[in-house]
């Protein structure tokens, strides 16, 4: 990596030297006939050498050891000193008129070199920051995705356990149904996106499993509308909203409850709505649900400016509306 970086730096500086040489030759191209060819090119390349030596000393010594360490006064003195010294050496005299003309010319070329240097450095820093943010985003998304797995499994096993305690004859079939759900979850967790149709089928199968556990005390409706096309969505993104409706609605009371879920697609936008009844006289929990906070964070990372989540937590009704543009 170090050798590659060094090679890249050398190539850039050779390219810079050649570019400055071409510009210097073109600058005095119209008066080249006043000199013989050797003298003309020797004269121009001597200017290029002085210019690049000043720029290199500035870039590789003065900036990292003085400017970057906020030793501004010393940096300014050294830079002016090296430019003045170069002007004196080039003119080979201390005649102020000649030295001053070349002095200001070297200041101009050094300033141009500094502008190019800082522009390139800012581009490198920006690219590194983008790569770091991308890596951080991937790590965070993987962490959040891994949190979904045990959370969903815990809720699903609770459902099976509840039916097993009731000695339900449907328990074996539900265990098999759970295994299918877990298979989908494990397969989808390895992907960045899945078909929206598959994700909604997964939710539908999960609701069928929960309906068995909740028996007749909860009415669940799940409607799907619109043309799903071949739209794709991040896996396990919608299920926490459904789990939240069951946990804080039907599961928290023995009274009759209701959960209405709808998913519709208009153009490339998914509209997902979950409405569940809430038992009366229940004090709000101080602890926020892990699954719900998790999915909110995933939405912000995956669909930063292309989703809208609205939650209306009323006294007896919990109403959640989510819109996601799946074209991004």
Image (spheres, rainbow, N blue to C red):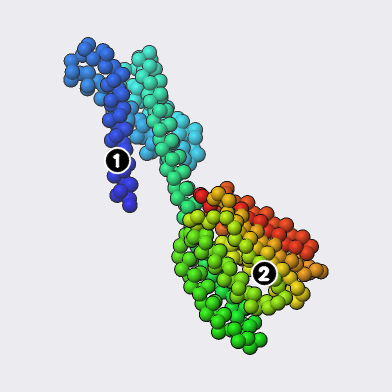
Q: Secondary structure at mark 2?
A: strand
- Closer to us: mark 1 or mark 2? 2
Of 212 and 19, nearer the camera is 212
Q: Residue at x 71, y 73 (%)?
A: 218
Q: Residue at x 38, y 21 (%)?
A: 105
Residue 328 vertical placement versus 84 (above, below): below
Residue 75 vertical placement versus 166 (above, below): above
Of 270 and 106, nearer the camera is 270
Q: Residues within 10 Å of mark 1 (few under 14, many from 20)?
A: few
Image-quadrant location for residue 200: bottom right
Disc 1 designates what residue? 10
Q: Earlier in the sequence, mark 1 or mark 2?
A: 1
Q: Secondary structure at mark 1?
A: helix
Say the numbered circle drawn on residue 220. 2
Of 280 and 57, nearer the camera is 280
Measuring from the top left, give residue 84's x and y in whole percent. Answer: 38, 24
């Amino acid at each position: 990596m170090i050798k590659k970086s060094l090679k890249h730096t050398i190539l850039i500086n050779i390219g810079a030297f050649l570019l400055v040489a071409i510009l210097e030759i073109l600058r005095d191209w119209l008066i080249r006939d006043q000199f013989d060819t050797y003298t003309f090119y020797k004269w121009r390349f001597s200017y290029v050498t002085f210019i690049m030596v000043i720029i290199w000393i500035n870039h590789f010594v003065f900036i990292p050891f003085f400017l970057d360490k906020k030793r501004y006064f010393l940096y300014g003195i050294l830079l002016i000193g090296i430019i003045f010294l170069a002007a004196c050496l080039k003119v080979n005299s201390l005649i102020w008129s000649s030295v001053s003309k070349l002095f200001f010319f070297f200041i101009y070329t050094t300033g141009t070199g500094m502008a190019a240097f800082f522009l390139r450095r800012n581009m490198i820093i920006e690219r590194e920051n983008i790569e770091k943010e991308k890596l951080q985003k991937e790590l965070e998304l993987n962490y959040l995705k891994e949190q979904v797995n045990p959370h969903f499994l815990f809720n699903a096993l609770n459902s099976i356990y509840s039916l097993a305690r009731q000695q339900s004859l449907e328990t074996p079939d539900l265990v098999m149904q759970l295994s299918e759900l877990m298979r989908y979850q494990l397969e989808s967790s390895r992907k960045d996106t899945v078909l929206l149709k598959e994700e909604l089928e997964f939710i539908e199968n999960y609701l069928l499993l929960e309906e068995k556990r909740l028996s007749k005390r909860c009415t669940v409706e799940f409607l799907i509308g619109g043309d799903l096309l071949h739209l794709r969505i991040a896996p396990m993104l919608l299920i926490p909203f459904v789990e939240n409706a069951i946990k804080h609605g039907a599961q928290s009371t023995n009274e009759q409850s209701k959960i209405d879920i709808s998913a519709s697609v208009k153009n490339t936008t998914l509209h997902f709505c979950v409405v569940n009844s809430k038992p009366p006289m229940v004090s709000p929990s101080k602890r926020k649900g892990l699954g719900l906070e998790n999915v909110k964070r995933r939405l912000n990372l995956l669909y930063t400016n292309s989703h809208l989540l609205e939650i209306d937590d009323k006294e007896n009704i919990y109403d959640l509306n989510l819109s996601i543009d799946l074209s991004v």
